[in-house]
Each structure stands twice: as structure tokens, then as C-alpha cells.
Amino acid sequence: MGIAARFTLGLGLLASVFASIAAFVLLQGIQQMGTDLVDEAQTELVAKTVRLQADGARRGTMTMAAHDTSVGIPVQTGIGMVSSTRGEETVKVFLANKPGAAGTPAEAVTMFAPANIGSGTATRVLALVVLVCGALVAATVIMGAFTARRLAAPLNEMVEDVLAISRGHLDRQIRGEDAVGEVAHLAVAVERMVDDLIESQENQEALAASEAEAENLRELRRHLQPMELEPPAGWSMETCLLEAGGAGSGDFVDAMEDGVGHMIALVGAPATHGMPGALLMAMTRAYLRSSFLGGAEPSVAFDAANTSLHRDLARGLYCSVIAARVDTFNRRVELVSAGHQAPAVRWDAQAGQLRKLQPNGIALGFDQGPIFRNSLETLHLDLQPGDALFLFSPLAFECTSPSGRQLGESGVYQLAKLAVDSGLEAMEDKLRQFLKTEPENDLAFALVRHHGVQV
């Protein structure tokens, strides 16, 4: 039931009760005053008559009014001056003819009463009415004040709770246990509004933290760029990293030259995203770069990085990497994969085909050493003039267009062929046209080409 209905019903019931009581009290009071007035009038009538008759009262001329009575004897009344031994005074005179015997004249009977008898009756009735009406008004005011207090108390509590929440006490609950009707609904609505505001604030804080994290990761990636190489005549090496719109997955690409005629390209994908993934990427990249720049073979560099990462990382963290070390003098390539779920793609110019190359191996940091070393496989291949080797992130398979079409394996291989023909820049433009926006994950690519002639 709403507040208006409750207030109206309660006030109406209370008014009805008090009106009934007031009517009863007023009726009883008037009846009692009527009885008292009759008794007083009768007593005064007898006393006044006896006194004036004893004083030999004589009435003067006055106007009389006739009244019929229930016993059939007419009575005349009038107010005028009466003379007696005590002097003159104004009295009310009652005249009636006393019936006599048959043939005997009727005898007049005269009675006297005070002229102002009952003059205080109006005052007494007015006092009674004022008293009863005043009690009714007081009861109505008390009921209204009680109802207003009942309504205002939960509203005041709600105001205090909202102010406390606005000052940062987000755990404060909106009180409304004693609220009724619309106030109870208002308490529920305010509670929901506060919950929505708190959730919105938490979402904004989370978004701000996510944006700050994403910016930190982008800054970290910008400072961890591949080395600038000057490949020998007839060779080229390109790298490309498409940064995610958010925190990203931490996939990375690196390129370096070890100083003894070897070019190294590698692509990695951490097992976790965000800041942990970025830190894992930085650690993995640092360990691998240190080993490769020291002249280590891919399998040796991977083994050293695996030992260090397994020692430093918490259980469940690892990083997959695929690396190609190119001996440009002998045109030989050593290809090693540590659990990388994306194969290397070789363009065989003589056959005019793309070929998948997937060496065996488990991810870096996953095992302490023996199992990792036994699982690691090194593929050796020759890159003839016109051949190329394409490395990429596993998450490239999951790239999805705004219409919901997934790039998939065939799409990645089309990108690989475009990269071989026109370079990674053309491939990047094509991929961005497909995505129409920033990718959800970091995507890393590396391309090694043997042109066969000086470029």
C-alpha cells in the first residue's frame, strides 16, 4: 500500500475513532447539562415563587405568550416587573388556570422564576464543544506528526547513507528496513543506483588501469626493437609487429647478427597476457639474445634459456619460440622450435610451393632440462635463390574480421605468399584491411629471403 493510501486510511480511521468518542462525550455532556438545567430551573421556580408570594408580589403589565402543555392546561409566560415588599425586580412569570369543581370558576395560579435562568448554558455548551473539537484536532495533529516522523526517519537514514557513500565509504548499505510504500521502493532504487555507481566506478578504475598497463606494455615493446641489420648481398631480413589495441598477448619478434656471418630471426609467444606476459617476453628475449650474440647454435641457445627460465618462472609459465639461424655464406638455415604452435613457412621457388616446417620441441621453461633437450629437434635446410622463410605468431590463425570471418590457416599462408612477393609491409597492409581495427593480440612476423642477386 502506498504512502498516500496508508496516510489517508490511518488518518481516516483515527479521525473516525476520535469523532465517535467526541460525539459520545458531547452527547453525554449536553444531556447532563440539560438535566442540570431542568433541575436548576425547577428549583429556582419553586424558590422564587415562594419568596415573592411571601413578599406579596404584584406583577405589572406585561406581554404574555400562551403555550400548550402535555396535560392539556394552557400556560402563559412572560417577563416583566414585579413589585414586592423588597422592591421591584424583573422576573419570569408563569400563569395557569387551576381547574375547579363543576360550576366553580377556575382559579389562576401564578408562579415566578428568575428572568436570567439558564443564561450560562450557552457558555457551557460552547466550552464543551471547544474542548471536544480541540481534543479531536490535537489527536489528528499527533497522528499526522507520528506519520510524518515515520516517513521522514527512513528518508533521513537514506540521506546519511548516500552522503557517506559519496565520501568514499563504498561498503555502506542503504538502510530502509522501517520504510513503507514508495519510501521502501525508493530505498531499493537508491541501493541499486549506488551499486550501479560503484560498479561503474570500479569498471572505470579497471579500464584506467588496463589502459595504463597497455600503454606501459606498448612503451616496453617500443624499447625492445629488433637489431638493425645489414644483410649480405642477395639477402634480406624483415620483421613486423602489430601491436594489440589493449594490453596484448606479449608476442614478440627479434632479429640480430652474431658477428660471424649468421643472421638470426625469432618469433615468440608467452603463455600469459598483459604485464606478466610482457615481462616473460622480455626475460625470454634477453636470455636468447645473450646466447645467440655469443655465437651459440639455436639448440644450445634454447637449452640455456630454458634452464634460466625454469629456474626463474613460477609453475605454469612458459614461452614458445621459433628461431632460424641463417648462414648466408653457405646458404644454410638451422630451424628450431620450442613448443611454437605456428610452423615456419618456406617458399620453394623452384617448386613454386609453400611448405610447412614444424620441428619438434616443448616450450621454454616448461621442463627443467633433460626432457626439453631430448625433445628439441633442429631442421637443416638450404635456401636457394628465390627461396624465403616466413615465421609468425600462432595467434595469427585466430584473427577475425568485423563480419566474423576467421583468417585461419589458408589466410595466413596467403599472407605468407604476399610477404614473399612484396615484403612484410604489403602483408601488414593486407592484414589491417582484413581486421579493420587494431588486433586483439600482438602479432609478430619475420621474413628471410634469398634473392640470389645483390639488392
Image: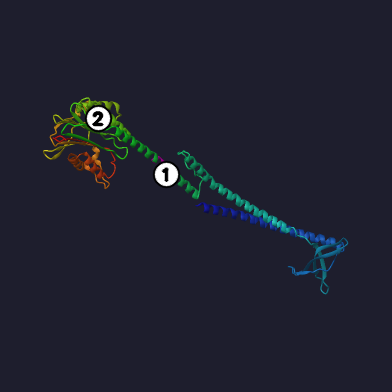
Magenta region, mostly helix, strand or loop?
helix
| Residue 8 seen in render | yes
Q: Residue furthest top?
A: 294
Horizontally, residue 96 falls left or right of residue 216, namely right
Give the residue type that dot 1 points to.
Asp
* Quarter residue 89 falls in: bottom right
The residues bearing labels 2 and 1 have C-alpha atoms spaced at a distance of: 44 Å
Give the mark nearer the N terminus: 2 vs 1.
1
Report the residue marked by disc 2.
364
Residue 214 position, x and y percent, is: 33, 37
From which residue to which does the magenta span run?
A: 194-203
Residue 438 position, x and y percent, is: 29, 42
Residue 175 position, x and y percent, is: 49, 43
Residue at horizontal 70%, vertical 55%?
127
**Relative depth, front residue between 42 and 186:** 186
Query: Eyeballing the image, is 454 above or below 156?
Result: above
**Relative depth, front residue between 303 and 76:** 303
